[in-house]
Image (cartoon, rainbow, N blue to C red):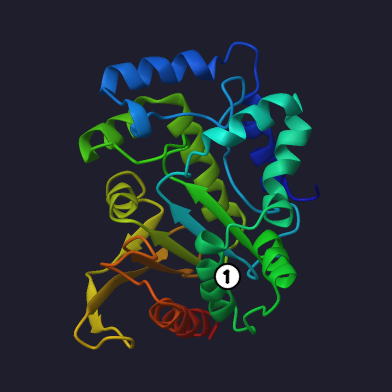
Amino acid sequence: MSTEWVQQLRALHDASFAADRDWSAHLQAVNQRLGLTGRRQLATPAPTLPPSWFVGDVEALQPGRWVLFVGLNQKRSPDDEAWHEAQNHSPQTYWDYWRWLNRRAWYAHFYYPRVRIAAAALDVAIPGERAQQQEFATTEMVCVEICPYSSEEFGLRDPDLLELLASDEGFRIASGIRHTFIEEAQPAFVLVAGNQAITVIEHADRNHMALGEPEYYPSVTNPERRLWHREGHLIPGASRVPVIACPALRTQSAHNSYDEIDQIGERARVLVRESRA
């Protein structure tokens, strides 16, 4: 690791393994206090492990040649918990697991739309083969979540989400990592997906991102459908790195088809070109 920001990120990651951090007990208390049960319970990949703080090979990123995706929270997979428990992860193996996740497993429904957007933003061809898509997602994209805890269904109301942002240790670490990417790692473009993620940006990250008013336009797939997104930029630094914020991708009420997702990608391409000019 040759860059200072990666070392800062690694320090936050390693500190989450400290012996005095009992993430299981912590989340039991959070779930009980907020009444989160069943599919809405918050969890980590395994009871003995800290949250996953990012997905993407942070050690391979090239300044200005990668894309940051900000989402709400990871999808929980209870079937994976036993596997993670059996790995007996160290800070190093856990760090490497999340760096190279897209090489070992490919969740195309989630990651492939983001590959299309990132490729457009970086003005390169969309990788055609699965292995190429996996490698692109590994080395030229990073995904982070507002909520560092996974769930099968997101059940936090806006007031509870904002309260956790202000008080919860896991949210504090996730915010620090997100801000490290924004301030130090030099992405070419940022996409924020999800209405509640946008709420957080406006309340808690307003010193890091500025967003304009919603822009409405017809879907290229179905002109009777109206889509929208908001455009803005990162605040740190002299360069204005473009940001697009939109509802969650691949939903019936938002950008769902690949053609609709490409509408965001093409707009990202224009914004990145303008920022570099």
Q: Residue at x 33, y 44 (%)?
A: 204
Q: Residue at x 41, y 16 (%)?
A: 28
Classify residue 81 by image quadrant. top right
* Disc 1: which residue: 115
Front-most of residues 15 and 137: 137
Percent position of residue 249, x then y: 39, 64
Q: Is residue 95 above or below residue 222?
A: above
Front-most of residues 50 and 268: 50
Crowding at mark 1 (Cα within 10 Å: few <14, some 14-19, many 20+): many
Q: Is residue 32 visible from the viewing direction of this image?
A: yes
Percent position of residue 220, x then y: 33, 88
Q: Is residue 237 above or below residue 33?
A: below
Q: Residue at x 56, y 47 (%)?
A: 180
Percent position of residue 97, x then y: 72, 42
Q: Is residue 143 above or below residue 262?
A: above
In-image side of 180 versus 234 (left or right): right
The kind of residue on which mark 1 rests is Val
Q: Residue furthest right?
A: 2
Percent position of residue 50, x then y: 58, 27
In-image side of 69 versus 263 (left or right): right
Give SS at disc 1: helix
Count the numbered circles shown. Answer: 1
Q: Is residue 90 visible from the viewing direction of this image?
A: no
In-image side of 25 versus 131 (left or right): left
